[in-house]
Image (tube, rainbow, N blue to C red):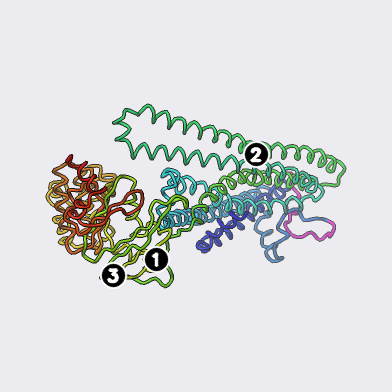
Amino acid sequence: MKDYFRLLAHLKPHLRYLIPAMIFMVLFAAMSGFSITMIVPFTKIVFSQPGEVSQLSFQQSENPDQKEENLVVLLPKALKKKFTQAIVGKTHLETLGRFCILVFLIFLVKNLFWYAQSFLIVRVEQGVIMDLRNKIYQHFHLLPLEYFHGQRTGVLISRITNDITLVKGAVANGFAQALRQSFLLLVYLFLVFWASWKLAFIALSLFPFALLIIGKFGQKVKKSSVVTQEKMGAMTSVLQETISGIRVVKAFVMEKFEIKKFMQATKDYFKTMVKLTRIGSLAPPLTEVLGVFAAVLLLWFAGREILSGQLDPSRFFLFLFAMLSLMQPLRTISHLNVDIQQGLAAAKRIFEVLDTQSKIKSYPDAVKKQSLQKNVTFKDVCFSYDGNKEVLSDISFEVKAGEAVALVGPSGAGKSTLMDLLPRFYDPTRGQIKIDGIDLRRINLGSLRNLMGIVTQETILFNDTVWNNIAYGQKDASEDRVHDAARAANAHDFIMAMPQGYHTMIGDRGVKLSGGEKQRLAIARALFKNPPILIFDEATSSLDSESEALVQEAIDRLMEGRTVFVIAHRLSTIQNVDKIVVLDHGKIVQIGDHESLMKQGGLYKRLYQMQFKI
């Protein structure tokens, strides 16, 4: 129930629609009950003798022992009189005609109330779904990289698509329907007791047994629903991985393998859905069977009461209609339990994401940095992903403003991990990284990352225009600034050769571009940002010679006047940097420029000789 109340808390911003919807629900329920009571005057009109028509009255009987046969008794005296005058005519036919018009108007008003509450509740329902989607998407952006490295992309997508859709069942079909059906239930219960309290007690004596059975079904549905949502997440993950890696799938002729894997995922989902539906579908028919059993008992008891003269037939008809009407909200509520349990299972998974807090936060007293003035220092920096094995140990070095520093070493030495600490994708386990003498954790996170431009080996571009990829997030970017950034990145010429120039769509992850073109667009994006600190993570390692030359020229231009960190496997691209830091097994083994390191010998010289086959 804790998760359900937490879910219902999201209704608060939509109370301006929820409250009127509830009012219309009450009015709809009242009109539904009133429409049923028309069975009593109808029987009087149809079955009365011709001479008795003028005696038909909807007013309170003068005999205190005689019960009123319809709900008009609840109206004020003046209204009852007008009501009677409006309905009772001089003849049977006139009374029947007026009565039919009244019934039509009652049902017309009732359905207007239905339409109003349905429209308003949809506003509430979709508003809550929108809020939850926005909230979880926003929260994704607040989570650290560490969280995403431990999750499958398809599972995360399932949280914001499938799980949110299931939550709709708990909010719309759950809460809203529960309100609507509860109001109807109360009205019908009132009519049932008003018609015959003896029959009502017999019927209600069976309720506890029915509720016990419904509760058992709800528990089973919730357990099955959790498994179903996990299978949906697994299926979505396989789908996402296959689509994003379709080039590899085709290159390795693994279509049959991937199809088989996806078919297994869909089969698992199919089995869990069948099981869930099998359990959930038992609730409505079981409820109806119990209702019919109750009806049979009531018919037997009521027949005895009517035959003995203790129960008026018209009141029995009213009781019967009210009781039959009562079955519908009861059946709906029993089925709602299935929707609510599925929604709660989904809500639990959503709240698990929302409750995950990022360790990477700005301190309340964090300062904002607009520029790098002195240096970047690493002092005794250690880092571990799992808290046990250190991937970086005792890293200490200084980079002065305007210097270019290269990080080299064999694969797995910790180069990329070290650079992930600079924009605070992770925080050091021990030690400090400072900019101008200020610990990174004391710098506002947004302003820290605004100081940096990052160009990686795996270029990330968006399914948007060239323009929007360069001027990422800035709608008011000037044409000169975008063009200048593209020219500096050696990208302007190939952009202008595209069908719509800067307004050409480049496809998902830039699929319509070559590797070199993608990299130059990424460099143009970094140039447009114009940051004081640049990080290049093996930006040219996967390019051909011609593309590498163009990209390297753009990189050299980008490096001018900035503090630069370069991770490189191709040592030919870093011979002119101010400092080279050589890493091995997470530790610094050498520091110096190219010439001094070649004279020292050691790991750097071995790597250089292996690469150039000296």
* C-beta proximity under 8 Å, tags 3 and 2: no
- The residue under the point 54% across, 50% down is 347
Look at the picture and state if 291 lies above or below 399.
Answer: above
The amino acid at mark 1 is Arg
Disc with the residue nearer the chain's start (1 vs 2): 2
Q: Is residue 267 found inside the magenta-colored segment of the image?
A: no
Could you say where residue 365 lies in the image, as x and y percent from the top left? 42, 73
Q: Position of residue 373 (x, y in %)?
A: 25, 70
The quarter of the rendered structure image containing the N terminus is bottom right
**Residue at the disc numbered 2:** 283
Question: Which residue is under mark 3?
Answer: 370
Q: Secondary structure at mark 3?
A: loop
Task: Classify 10 Å Cα crowding around label 2: few (below 14), some (14-19), many (20 and above).
Answer: many
Residue 324 quadrant: top right
Marks 3 and 2: which is nearer the front?
Answer: 3
Q: Amino acid at mark 3?
A: Gln
Name the spot of residue 218 as percent of width and height, x first.
64, 43
Q: In the image shown, does 601 or 447 lie closer to the viewer?
A: 601
Q: Secondary structure at mark 2?
A: helix
Pinpoint residue 219: horizontal percent, then vertical percent.
65, 43
Q: Are marks 1 and 2 in contact (CB under 8 Å)?
A: no
Viewer-nearest residue: 59 or 347: 347
Give me the residue at 57% from left, 55% from top. 109
Q: How far apart are the two marked residues, 3 and 2, measured between alpha carbons? A: 63 Å
The answer for how far apart the CA atoms under marks 1 and 2 are is 56 Å
Please rate how many residues cluster around mark 3, counting C-alpha atoms within 10 Å: few if below 14, some from 14 to 19, many from 20: few
Residue 441: which numbered mark, if any?
A: 1
For the record, the magenta segment spans 47-65
Q: Main secondary structure of the magenta part?
A: loop
